[in-house]
């Protein structure tokens, strides 16, 4: 019954006066209660029904999950141990391996192509001390064939290893500042190396040789971290450079031979050995009978040139130490020693040049005095009586003139030899020279790492500006490597050759002197 209907009935019944208001109100309340009860019964029945279903379903599922447990009884029984039979293993019969003949492959030399220059590396100015391997692996140079040759032993070049340098620097009082200056020079030389591996303009073999000698003196090889490529390219250039004994009076060939010999001694690279032997042949064949040299390797004895001879003597020493077996090498050294001693006996004392049948009246230069003394020292004759007064002269007169800002004529050329000569002499003669020359070089070096030649050049102009700086820088840098470049002469400085199977007169052989025997065991 709708509300509309209820209102209509209410109005009609009230209007007709059939029921009182109280009766109508009671009837209405009864009606509403009945409607409320009807609305509640339906949902209650539905809810109860659903609850019953849920309870019945839960009981059903619970019965399904229950599993009957079986009764298990555990009993222990004694069991007799089982005895295992020993298994015998028979040793197999040993059979001798069949011997096979294995032939050692022959090594051939491969021509090396030029290596491109790393432009970024050329700008590197790192001052860290370059490291070198104490024992260079023979197969470390990828495209260079290495031979098993009688190269110099570590006792000769051992001072150039990382450990050797550290020991020598401490032992012979090399200053930290001096080695920093040397390191700057190496980086500058690397920077100005030409793409083909050379240095210099005219006389390129000489300046390339001097630069390579500088890196080798510091122990740098083709495997070195910072300078490996620099060294490798220089070696390639020198090995491929054709022989020209007439270039600039022969100086470039002598210096190139010197560098090739040291490079071969330190690496054992076959192409360097071949180039060394060919170059040494020129030195042997071009020596005068009396033991000296003249420009362009003229064997006519009308003139002897000690300056030119000095570079050839250093090259002969290096080749001998590298194991060069060119016929006549030992005899060439004998003749050189005899000629040097004869030129130290006269009043002139190591003149620059002499002529046969003429008295030696020219006053000796400080440069030539140092050349003569050092070469005899390197040949194992450092204790010769003929040069005692020359050594004293270097240690006093020449030391007093060691002044970069007020240098004597041809100063740096002479200082290069004198520094080595004083190191070889050692003791009280070495210490004051060591202090002074390091100070002079340190204070005169350009911030970029090079030096400008003081005084006059020996032999005149040496080329363009860069070439002149290369010349001065290599001589200065070589002076700063003196501590570990060669052992003192009393320790066998000229080299280490295995002479056990050679018929050599030990009294005459310069390497077999008493002071060198400890290296030739």
Image (spheres, helix red, strand yellow):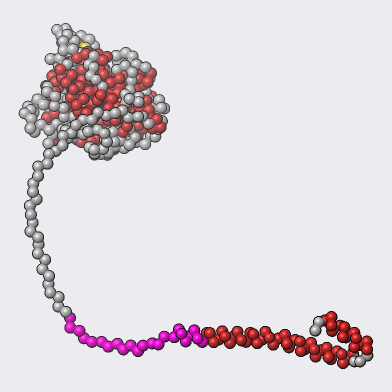
Residue at horizontal 87%, vertical 92%? 23
Residue at horizontal 25%, vertical 28%? 111
Question: Could you tell me residue 215's position as x and y percent?
Answer: 30, 30
Q: Report the side of 467 relative to 59 (left or right).
A: left
Residue 240: quadrant of the picture? top left
Residue 41 visible in the shown view: yes
Please name whichever residue, 179 or 85, is drawn nearer the observer in this view of the structure.
Answer: 85
Q: Report the side of 205 relative to 491 (left or right).
A: right
Q: Which residues are magenta?
A: 59-81
Disc tally is: 0
Question: Could you tell me residue 360's position as x and y percent?
Answer: 18, 10
| Residue 464, above or below 102 | above
Q: Going by the picture, which residue comes out furthest to the top? A: 358
Residue at horizontal 54%, vertical 87%? 56
Question: Could you tell me residue 267's position as x and y percent?
Answer: 23, 33
Q: Report the side of 513 relative to 460 (left or right).
A: left
Q: Is residue 170 magenta?
A: no
Residue 136: quadrant of the picture? top left
Question: Could you tell me residue 326's position as x and y percent?
Answer: 14, 24
Residue 421: quadrant of the picture? top left
Q: Report the side of 179 relative to 11 (left or right).
A: left
Q: Is residue 70 magenta?
A: yes
Residue at horizontal 27%, vertical 88%? 75
| Residue 434, above or below 51 | above
């Amino acid at each position: 019954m709708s509300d509309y209907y209820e209102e209509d009935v209410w109005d009609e019944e009230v209007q007709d006066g059939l029921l009182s208001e109280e009766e109508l109100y009671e009837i209405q309340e009864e009606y509403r209660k009945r409607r409320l009860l009807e609305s509640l019964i339906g949902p209650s029945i539905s809810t109860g029904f659903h609850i019953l279903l849920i309870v019945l379903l839960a009981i059903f599922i619970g019965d399904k999950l229950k599993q009957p447990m079986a009764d298990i009884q555990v009993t222990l029984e004694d069991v007799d141990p089982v005895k295992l039979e020993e298994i015998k293993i028979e040793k197999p019969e040993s059979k001798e391996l069949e011997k096979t003949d294995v032939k050692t492959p022959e090594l051939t030399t491969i021509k090396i192509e030029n290596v491109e220059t790393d432009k970024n590396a050329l700008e590197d100015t790192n001052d860290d001390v370059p490291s070198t391997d104490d024992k260079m692996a023979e197969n470390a140079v990828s495209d260079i064939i290495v031979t098993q040759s009688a190269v110099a032993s570590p006792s000769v070049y051992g001072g150039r290893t990382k450990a050797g340098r550290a020991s020598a620097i401490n032992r012979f009082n090399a200053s930290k500042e001096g080695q920093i200056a040397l390191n700057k020079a190496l980086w500058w030389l690397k920077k100005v190396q030409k793409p083909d591996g050379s240095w210099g303009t005219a006389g390129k073999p000489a300046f390339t040789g001097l630069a390579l000698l500088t890196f080798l003196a510091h122990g740098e090889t083709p495997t070195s971290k910072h300078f490996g490529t620099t060294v490798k390219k220089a070696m390639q250039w020198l090995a491929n450079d054709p022989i020209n004994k007439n270039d600039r009076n022969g100086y470039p060939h002598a210096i190139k031979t010197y560098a090739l010999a040291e490079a071969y001694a330190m690496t054992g690279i076959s192409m360097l050995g071949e180039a060394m032997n060919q170059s040494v042949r020129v030195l042997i064949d071009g020596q005068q009978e009396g033991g000296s040299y003249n420009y362009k390797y003229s064997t006519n004895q009308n003139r002897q040139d000690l300056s030119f001879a000095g570079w050839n003597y250093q090259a002969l020493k290096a080749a001998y130490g590298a194991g060069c077996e060119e016929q006549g090498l030992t005899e060439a050294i004998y003749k050189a020693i005899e000629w040097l001693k004869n030129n130290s006996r006269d009043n002139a004392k190591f003149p620059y040049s002499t002529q046969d049948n003429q008295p030696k009246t020219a006053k000796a230069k400080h440069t030539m005095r140092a050349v003569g003394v050092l070469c005899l020292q390197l040949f194992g004759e450092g204790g010769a009586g003929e040069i005692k007064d020359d050594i004293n002269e270097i240690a006093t007169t020449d030391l007093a003139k060691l002044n970069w800002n007020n240098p004597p004529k041809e100063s740096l050329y002479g200082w290069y030899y004198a520094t080595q000569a004083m190191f070889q002499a050692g003791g009280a003669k070495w210490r004051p020279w060591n202090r002074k020359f390091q100070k002079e070089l340190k204070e005169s070096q350009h911030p970029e790492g090079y030096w400008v030649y003081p005084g006059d050049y020996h032999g005149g102009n040496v080329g363009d500006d860069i070439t002149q700086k290369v010349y001065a820088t290599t001589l200065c840098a070589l002076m700063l490597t003196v501590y570990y470049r060669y052992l003192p002469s009393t320790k066998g400085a000229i080299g280490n050759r295995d002479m056990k199977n050679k018929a050599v007169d030990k009294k005459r052989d310069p390497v077999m002197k008493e002071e060198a025997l400890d290296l030739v065991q």
